[in-house]
Amino acid sequence: MSLLRAKIQDVFNEPACEQNRGKDANARKEGCSKPLIPGAAAGGCAFDGAKIVLQPITDVAHLVHGPLACEGNSWDNRGAASSGPTLWRTSFTTDLTELDVVMGQGERKLFKAIREIKEAYGPPAIFVYPTCVTALIGDDIEAVCQRAAEEFGLAVVPVNAPGFAGSKNLGNKLAGEALLDHVIGTVEPDDAGPYDINILGEFNLSGEFWLVKPLLDRLGIRVRACIPGDARYVDIAGAHRARAAMMVCSTALINLARKMDERWGIPFCEGSFYGITDTSEALRQISELLVKQGANPEILGRTELLIAEEEAIAWKKLAAYRPRLAGKRVLLNTGGVKSWSVVHALMEIGIEIVGTSVKKSTVEDKERIKQILKNDNHIFEQMAPRELYAMLSERKADILLSGGRTQFIALKAKTPWLDINQERQHPYAGYDGMVELVRQIDLAIQNPIWCQVREPAPWDCQPAVREELPRTNSETATLHVVQEFAGTTAGNFGEC
């Protein structure tokens, strides 16, 4: 437990974070996340955050040491994709019961589980995740992993991020610390070159990094390790021989980028592959970093040629959507890098941004948003579901871009909705990804279902008021009623 406290304090002291540098020593120790309220939906725990960062490493067995529910609730929490191994899709857990806890069988059961995984699957590594229960009862995860590694001849990596340690974001950083302490630098690649880079904080959601990697391949740039999207253990273990790195999500792995720079001299830049302009700028930054590290300057010229070619193709494809989407209003309820990169991408084709959330964004992300929108009224820290529903039901936005948790608010408000978070089904990165994002927005907004669901229900329609017929006697009144009924259809009784 003391080791965990020391690691958390080290993570909180992040020199690469401008906001962190501006705090005094005492405030820095408290970190940036608000304390979690027991029983409240806090958006994930440290264990969940560590699992998010490491599970996309595809050829590794991910073993959760704790009760069954911890693995059940954290499995498949990102829509990452793999181009090869499928071991990461298999759930492994020690499934501790009350009897195991009382009888002190946790460490024995963990060692047995590691042996069974080794014999059945033979992975290059096993990542072990302690949970709240096993951390509280004092199971020595590091000792068990060390002994198992020596006996079975494979890497067994302890990921010391139990849920009670803090927020999901803290778990992201603790996962990065686990890679630094036990994985990166343990394998020496024999093919290191001047054009090798690392991509940090890219999760390959819906396979979207596969839309970016061909661009780097055409420039002769090799991705030594993409952490964690579609990664292999040996690639991450040799990631310390890359010449430069690009950080996609600074909220999650800024500590990993900074420490790799300090230990192995790998400079990094922060960028985004969302949107045409941002994708082009990211390619330029990568090329410039490589040149500073000794690569041939001719790569700068090739990069500009590639950018000009790809931008021309992308803008030609987007031309068909401009008149259909010009002036459409979009509300974004997301965070992190998407809070500014998607905003910039949509504004490039004439879409108006009526609001974007910055709940999970860094100070640098917020500054970028202010520069792009130039209106603080369109930036909100957090919007309550009631306020979100009111804004959508009053037609202040034509579509909501968010994660799955707010989709039902949009549907209740009879407003189009598109998923841009981790559960999405379409890749939106790179030039082709931007075209796909615009196409999906157009399909959602132009869907004829919205005109139909916004019409009043038949029972809400007011029937037409008819003047009462003069009645001289009962026979005349009855005759008029019969004649009117005979000549009247259902559609004549009233219109909406």
Image (tube, rainbow, N blue to C red):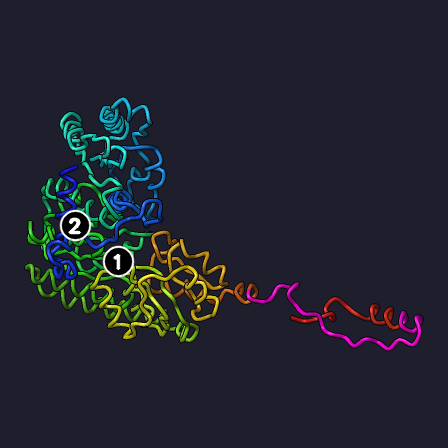
Which mark, by number, is residue 224? 2
Indicate left or right for 65 with 327 as reference. left
**Relative depth, front residue between 230 and 71:** 71
Q: Residue 357 location, x and y as percent?
A: 32, 63
Q: Which residues are magenta?
A: 454-479
Question: In terms of secondary structure, what is the magenta stretch mainly?
Answer: loop
Q: CA distance from mark 1 to mark 2?
A: 14 Å
Q: How many marks?
A: 2
Q: Is residue 260 magenta?
A: no
Residue 301 sits above or below residue 2 on the image? below
Q: Quadrant of the N terminus?
A: top left
Write down the quadrant of residue 312 in the picture. bottom left
Query: On the image, numbered disc 1 is attached to which residue?
Result: 212
Residue at (26, 27) in percent of width and height = 113
Quarter-of-image position of residue 119: top left
Badge 1 amino acid: Val
Indicate the position of residue 288 as horizontal and vertical percent values: 12, 64
Sequence-first disc among 1 and 2: 1
Q: Is residue 459 magenta?
A: yes
Name above or below for residue 22 compared with residue 103: below
> Can residue 176 be seen in this snapshot?
yes
Instruction: Tell me: residue 156, above or below residue 82.
Output: above
Q: Neighbour class for label 1 at 10 Å: few (<14), some, many (≥20)?
A: some
